[in-house]
Amino acid sequence: MASIRRYRLLPVIAFSLGAVAAHAEERFEVAAIRPNGSGSPNTQINLPNGGRLIIVNATLKTLIRNAYGILGFQLAGGPPWLDGDKFDINAKTGDSQAITSDRLKPLLQNLLADRFQLKVHWQGKDGPVYALVAEKTGPKFSRAAGGPDRGMNTSKGPGKVHMKGSGVPMSELSSNLANQLGRFVVDQTGLDGEYDFVLDWDPDQLADSTGPSLFTALHEQLGLKLEPRKGQVPVLVIDSVEKPSEN
């Protein structure tokens, strides 16, 4: 799994079926793309000041996921090199305005369309989903304190996953839970704004496990629960794509 820690990753998106239109007004002024043959398993996505984007060792799959805010199981189609070839990208906008995570999406979408000739469309797929809801007693966490370090940080060890959210909306928690469960999670908590929380659970649930399951941890530590439901999962289908030329 690629390591991407410098900005908020993969929020749950609203979608509509049909062709995906890129945002014409959001384009990089210059962008250099080169293959990365380091063999490293780690990916870095950095947003330095001055309207810059620096990506190191990212697959096309990682680029698309971040451009459209989706999880791995929401992407269909693509060439054999989708999750194999790695790329470095050094890009800059025409202004000094900081690139926020929301602004990054249309910028990346246009970069993929222009340089990778990426063409995609949305498709709705019926299947099992989870609804994240607040329990009747209310949530057991508080609104964000406004600290400097904002975002999600998840660390894993033997028999334990530690998830810390600092100043994040419930939609982002839903996305991260979906990534853990491999199933689409819809935010139906009714909680707006941003929150701070900590969540610890045992993903293995072996006979000698002492930690709670993810479902129990959500109930005991956050006052939330996941309800299984049927729903429509948005899937991004790759129609065509090409490898970029170096520059």
Image (tube, rainbow, N blue to C red):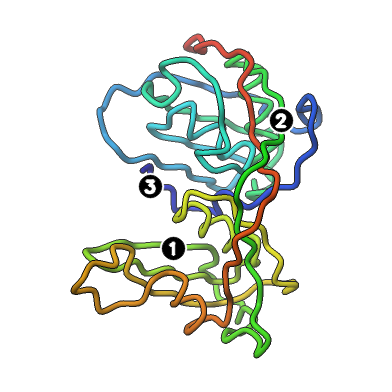
Q: CA distance from mark 1 to mark 2?
A: 29 Å
Secondary structure of the residue carrying numbered label 2: strand
The quarter of the picture where the N terminus appears is top left
In whole angstroms, how far apart are the C-alphas of marks 3 and 2?
26 Å
- Which numbered circle lies on residue 153? 1
Residue to which mark 3 is pinned = 3
Residue 34, relative to residue 72: is it above or below? above
What residue is disc 2 on? 122
Q: Could you say where residue 26 lies in the image, as x and y percent from the top left?
A: 75, 33
The amino acid sitting under disc 3 is: Ser
Mark 2 and mark 1 in contact (Cβ < 8 Å)? no
- Of the two numbered discs 1 and 2 on the same chain, state the one appearing first in sequence: 2
Please indicate whether residue 214 sits to the left or right of residue 32 in the image.
Answer: left
Cα–Cα gap, marks 1 and 3: 11 Å
Disc nearer the start of the sequence (1/3): 3
Q: Nearer the viewer, residue 123 or 192?
A: 123
Q: Where in the figure is residue 183, as x and y percent of width and height?
A: 53, 50
- Asked if the residue at tag 2 contacts the one at tag 3, i.e. Cβ–Cβ closer than 8 Å, the answer is no
Q: Residue at x 57, y 24 (%)?
A: 31
Is 193 positioned to the left or the right of 132 in the image? right
The numbered mark at residue 30 is none
